[in-house]
Image (tube, grey):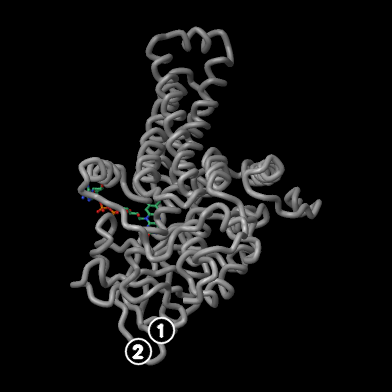
Amino acid sequence: MRPPTAQTEQPNTPAGTDDALIQIEDRLRWARAQLEPELEQRFIDGAADPAATRVLVEAGFLGLTLPSRYAGLGQDYRTLGAVCASLGRLDLSFQITVTVHLALAAMTILQWGTDRQRSRWLPSLASGDEIGTFALTEPGAGSDVAAIRTRATTGAGGFVLTGEKTWISGANDSSLLLVFATIDPKLRHRGITAFLVSRDAAGVSTPALSGKLGIRAGDTGGVVLDNVFVPSENLLGRVGEGFAIALSALGYGLFTVGYGALGIIRECLSLVVTLVQSDARSRRHATDQTVRAKIAAMVADEASAQVLLDRAAELKNRGRPSQQATSLAKWTAARGADRAATLAMQMAQDLHSPSLATFERHLRNAKGATIYGGTNEIHQVMQAAYATGDRLDHPPRRPTLTAAELAGETRGNTTHAG
Ligand SMILES: Cc1cc2nc3c(=O)[nH]c(=O)nc-3n(C[C@H](O)[C@H](O)[C@H](O)COP(=O)(O)OP(=O)(O)OC[C@H]3O[C@@H](n4cnc5c(N)ncnc54)[C@H](O)[C@@H]3O)c2cc1C
């Protein structure tokens, strides 16, 4: 079965309009119908199914916010958020595919790439012919990004990369890796440099990572780079600019992670309400003060996450600084998802509900949302530092793209050549 828009060949409609939202809703309904039947089994199997990625490709979600001149749908950040929340309701692994491919890889190429790099990569990323991923974390460098050790040395016509990445979502399924390496570890963040690396390049291997607690239906692996030659034309941004590029990529990434977490809160709340209304015993249970407190906590968490995420989306749509707002929104949503799934599990246990396995899956997945895109503790530290004036955000050399620019209005940095 084809997605509704492909069947009727509807043209892409301007972001934020009623028609656009209806079109996205149609695509979501179609994707949900394809993905839902296998959900629990995929999680139990603990193996990613490339067919799920193809569903996201067919629905157009992997090019959702890319301008139409790059074969994307030109939608805005609100719509991206709505899609990620909807996928998060199903299973966070689907939202993560959108996060790493679109938010972390494609949007970063859109923001930082040369005209040549955009033309080379973005149409094939939008169509799903290429699947992108984001390789920053290393065995000794997670929260402390400046500690990366993957080394980039200059060679004839390009660079040679050697090192190891870990916990990379989509490592095995991807064909294009956005890799961060350092020209000199002693330079810390000033040495970090970004490269576009083909998964097929000689010296690249991606050992699988299995037995995860959560995101079990998602592909996660390592990336080993053994003297990998990267031509100069695949340098993204300038030498030493990789830290700024990684931060701006994470700005898109953790925004989508926050919406995915909101999806978990929403799904747990919805299932719990259905559960306590299902029979007389459950309805009596729902009048218990402690049960009411749990449901109320989920209602409050859903609303706060939604409001904060939508505020971040609006700032991004308008091209306003959004780092502080996005960090706060992601932190709030991830904490809320963890709590909602925990409370839902407790209630399902009390009521001997068959939904227990679903809540357990969401709880395990929610743990992931409290780690990637910056751990809860890191966002906590950041928020305090913003409040005390110890952390200030500096606008990057290349600004993030506004909703109008995503919709195709070429202005400002979208026409730069390098
Ligand atoms: C499912 C999953 C998918 C992922 N996908 C990707 C991906 O696609 N690409 C990628 O590059 N990475 C990915 N990651 C890695 C993720 O970004 C890192 O795990 C995360 O940044 C934390 O780094 P770490 O695991 O090294 O923990 P550490 O940084 O070692 O932290 C360990 C603990 O110490 C705390 N801590 C560390 N520093 C501080 C501090 N200064 N103040 C207070 N507390 C602190 C942390 O909060 C944490 O609790 C993924 C991780 C997971 C779990």
Mark 1: which secondary structure? strand
Would residue 382 be found to the left or right of residue 230 on screen? left
Q: Is residue 326 above or below residue 184?
A: above
Q: Nearer the viewer, residue 50 or 245?
A: 245
Q: Residue at x 36, y 36 (%)?
A: 335
Looking at the image, do the residues carrying marks 1 and 2 touch, with CB atoms under 8 Å apart?
A: yes
Query: Based on the displayed image, in which of its 4 quarters is residue 126 positioned?
Result: bottom right
- Which residue is more in the foreground, 404 or 91? 404
Residue position marked by numbered label 2 in the rendering: 155
For residue 114, above or below residue 209: below
Please give the residue where the numbered disc 1 appears in the rendered image: 229
Q: Residue furthest left?
A: 186
Quadrant housing residue 305: top left
Snapshot quadrant of residue 347: top left
Location of residue 346 with respect to 415 vertically, above or below = above
Q: In the image, 25: left or right of 376? A: right
Query: What percent of the width, then of the height, locates residue 195?
Result: 41, 74
* Element marked by disc 2: strand
Outermost residue, front side = 411
Can residue 54 be seen in the rendering of this structure?
Answer: no
Q: Is residue 140 left or right of residue 367?
A: left
| Image x and y of residue 27, in percent | 68, 46
Q: What x and y, as percent, mark residue 225? A: 37, 75
- What residue lies at 42% left-to-right and 35% top-to-bottom? 337
- Give, as a three-letter code, the residue at label 1: Phe
Distance, label 1 to label 2, CA atoms, is 8 Å
Residue 25 can be seen, yes or no: yes
> What residue is drawn where x is 35% and y is 79%?
161
